[in-house]
Image (cartoon, grey):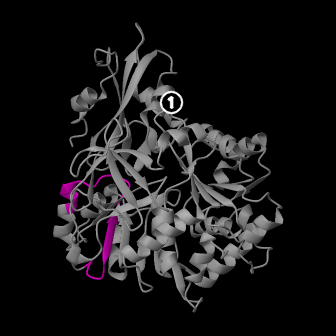
């Protein structure tokens, strides 16, 4: 069978003139440009380093590093070497990394130098044999060791069904699940998006997203690589700096929060966007006000799409202007993707009716890492994946998302699952119980808010609770506010009515 390694397909798309610019770092102290040859040689040397470690086939390589071009090279090198990449949010703290290491059992952990002390201790105690460091300043033991390796490497052959990545996505129980994505899942989706969004070799992508999740890594970065297109690379989002580079670019991808911040820049106008051909938004719902404001200011209509860690992209508003783009919808299913709507009893619903969205296609993952029971629970008897999202499909096949999985909060494009935060708050002294909700926020879309019930006689302080949480979980999960109330609203069955809490506090941030 032909080689189905995702890296091989990306490498085949590199331009013949390898010495041309592939990635320009836009926010460093000095201009730094990486050529396609740099990507070829860098990934080869890191892949050879992994090969020198005599790792078992299909070993997991856990990445807990800052965004950098070298981090992207590491991701590509893991695929090139035939192993499995496990990207993690750099904001995760020690307790969270301890869980991921225990669950994924990586053969290699690559962490940022500032976390080496506690990260290496966790890894070695769990049996991980190799720990390297990689900073965003082109320093670290990974590059030191890779620098002694040959810069030629033949990619390891892989089947389409072979595991390429494990992407952890939290669950309502608070326990993170590892979505297993194969080379076939990722490559099929990349090729579909290449056609659907009109990727060209002369495109220039402004890359501002993190590379530890699907949007920034598998959609944005790999989309540009598969097109042989250049990237203007921002390690950190800076609205003014992005607007200044728009005249040089053709494609931008962001979450709704970023579009809101760009709209606050006076330099954003039709002139600065004249050379752009595509603005894509995802990872969270786009407010119709933002959709309209962007069109008025820039002269461009944002393309909204819908996807998940378990499926990569599922739907997209059309790229071609004659087909139109509709605010408030995520467009029809992408080629090869099936979408259906089911009622509470599993019955198929008619067009326009609201129910649970179920999907299937070559992009849909095979299941959750070492969770066979959870995997079976999330798939229907006939093989459709239950997204957990509520939506409707109209007579023309356009999909609208009207609700989300129970309790999920999306803040600044990041998923936050209340059960995880509640379990930590409930462990604190003086707390009887808590409820974590999302309320409207003008910048983040939704803000995490905790409502806490104190024990009799206990004096709880919201700032103290926030401080305790900051030491244990990623910053985006920490509540923006903690409110102390004598009790939580409940229905006749004793269930906390979070909808009432959301209504009560929806104006907390003036949204």
Number of residues whose C-alpha sits closer than 10 Å to that of mark 1, classed few (under 14), some (14–19) or many (20 or more): some
Task: Characterize the magenta stretch by its predominant secondary structure.
Answer: loop
Left-right relation of 18 to 295:
right
Residue at 73% of width from left, 78% of height from top? 154
Q: Nearer the viewer, residue 335 or 27?
A: 335
Residue 145, can we see it? no
Left-right relation of 298 to 189:
left
Mark 1 lies on residue: 468
Helix, strand or loop at mark 1: helix
Residue at 22% of width from left, 58% of height from top? 290
Q: Nearer the viewer, residue 357 or 201?
A: 357
The answer to whether residue 151 is above or below residue 54 is below
Residue 199 percent across, percent down from the top left: 41, 79
Residue at 45% of width from left, 17% of height from top? 431
Query: Which residues make up the magenta segment?
Result: 272-291
Residue 59: name its quadrant: bottom right
Residue 272 percent across, percent down from the top left: 27, 78
The answer to whether residue 224 is above or below residue 426 is below
Which quadrant of the rendered structure holds the N terminus? Answer: bottom right
Residue 240, can we see it? yes
Residue 128 percent across, percent down from the top left: 76, 48
The answer to whether residue 332 is above or below residue 176 is below
Left-right relation of 57 to 301:
right
Residue 34: name its quadrant: bottom right
From this viewpoint, which residue is outermost toward the top? 457
């Amino acid at each position: 069978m032909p080689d189905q390694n995702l890296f091989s397909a990306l490498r085949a798309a590199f331009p013949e003139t390898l010495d041309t610019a592939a990635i320009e770092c836009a926010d460093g102290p000095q201009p730094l440009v990486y050529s396609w040859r740099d990507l070829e040689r860098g990934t080869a040397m890191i892949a050879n380093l992994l090969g020198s470690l005599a790792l078992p086939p299909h070993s997991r390589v856990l990445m807990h590093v800052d965004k950098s071009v070298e981090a992207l090279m590491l991701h590509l090198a893991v695929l090139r070497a035939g192993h499995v990449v496990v990207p993690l949010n750099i904001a995760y703290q020690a307790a969270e990394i301890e869980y991921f290491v225990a669950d994924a059992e990586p053969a290699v952990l690559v962490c940022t130098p500032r976390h080496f002390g506690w990260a290496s201790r966790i890894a070695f105690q769990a049996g991980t044999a190799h720990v390297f460091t990689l900073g965003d300043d082109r320093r670290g033991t990974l590059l030191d060791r890779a620098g002694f390796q040959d810069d030629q490497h033949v990619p390891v052959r892989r089947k389409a069904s072979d595991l390429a990545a494990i992407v952890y996505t939290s669950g309502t129980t608070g326990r993170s699940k590892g979505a297993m994505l194969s080379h076939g899942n990722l490559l099929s989706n990349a090729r579909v998006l290449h056609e659907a969004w009109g990727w060209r070799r002369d495109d220039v992508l402004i890359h501002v997203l993190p590379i530890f999740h699907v949007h920034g890594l598998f959609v944005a970065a790999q989309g540009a690589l598969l097109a042989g297109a250049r990237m203007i690379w921002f390690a950190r989002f800076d609205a003014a700096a992005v607007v200044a580079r728009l005249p040089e670019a053709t494609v931008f991808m962001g979450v709704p929060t970023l579009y809101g911040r760009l709209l606050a820049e006076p330099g954003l106008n039709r002139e600065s966007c004249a050379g752009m051909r595509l603005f894509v938004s995802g990872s969270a719902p786009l407010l119709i006000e933002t959709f309209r404001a962007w069109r008025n200011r820039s002269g461009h209509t944002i393309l909204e799409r819908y996807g998940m860690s378990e499926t990569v992209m599922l739907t997209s508003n059309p790229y071609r202007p004659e087909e139109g783009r509709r605010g408030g919808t995520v467009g029809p299913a992408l080629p090869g993707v099936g979408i259906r709507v089911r009622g509470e009893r599993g019955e198929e619903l008619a067009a326009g009716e609201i129910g649970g969205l179920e999907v299937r296609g070559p992009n849909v993952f095979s299941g959750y890492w070492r969770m066979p029971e959870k995997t079976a629970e999330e798939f229907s008897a006939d093989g459709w994946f239950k997204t957990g999202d509520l939506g409707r499909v109209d007579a023309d096949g356009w999909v609208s998302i009207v609700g989300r999985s129970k309790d999920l909060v999306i803040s600044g494009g990041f998923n936050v699952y209340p059960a995880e935060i509640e379990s930590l708050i409930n462990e604190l002294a003086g707390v009887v119980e808590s409820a974590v909700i999302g309320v409207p926020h003008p910048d983040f879309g939704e803000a995490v808010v905790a409502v806490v019930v104190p024990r009799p006689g206990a004096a709880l302080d919201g700032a103290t609770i926030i401080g305790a949480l900051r030491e244990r979980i990623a910053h985006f999960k920490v509540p923006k506010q903690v409110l102390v109330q004598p009790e939580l609203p409940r229905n006749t069955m004793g269930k906390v009515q979070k909808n009432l809490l959301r209504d009560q506090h929806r104006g907390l941030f003036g949204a």
